[in-house]
Amino acid sequence: MGIQEILSALSDGERRKILTILKEGKISSGDLAKRMEMTPQALSYHLKKLKKADLIYETKFKNFIFYELNLTILDEVVFWIDSLRKDDENDK
C-alpha cells in the first residue's frame, strides 16, 4: 500500500461515496450494492481498488462478505497531508 494507491482510490467519486456509506458502520456487499444503486460487478471493481489501497477491509460470515473502513489508513493519510501543511507554514 502506498500513498499513490490511496490517492488514486480517493480520486473517484463513487469510491468516496462508498467510504461515506461505510462511515456508518459495517455493511454487507449486497446491501452496499443496493445503497450505491450499482450492479455487484461494478461495486466489486470499486471495492477491489479500495482494498488494494487498504482503505477498507472485509470480513466473511457464512455466505456474506461485510466491509468496513480502515480508519488507521485514513488517519495516516490525514497525518501526512497535515504534515505538508505544517511544513508550508514553517516556510512563511
Image: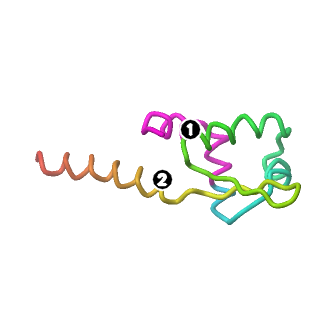
Residue identifier under label 2: 73
Residue 82 magenta-highlighted = no
Identified at 62% across, 43% down, the residue is 51
41 vs 65: above or below: above
Q: Is residue 31 left or right of residue 45?
A: right
Q: Is residue 43 left or right of residue 4?
A: right
Amino acid type for the residue under numbered disc 1: Ala
Q: Nearer the viewer, mark 1 or mark 2?
A: 2
Residue 12: horizontal and vertical position, in percent? 60, 36
Identified at 19% across, 46% down, the residue is 88
First in residue order: circle 1 vs circle 2: 1
Q: Bounds of the magenta span?
A: 1-19
CA gap, disc 1 and disc 2: 12 Å
Q: Is residue 73 left or right of residue 48?
A: left
As helix, strand or loop, the secondary structure at mark 1 comes to: helix
27 vs 49: above or below: below
Residue 54: horizontal and vertical position, in percent? 55, 46
As helix, strand or loop, the secondary structure at mark 2 comes to: helix
Identified at 42% across, 39% down, the residue is 3
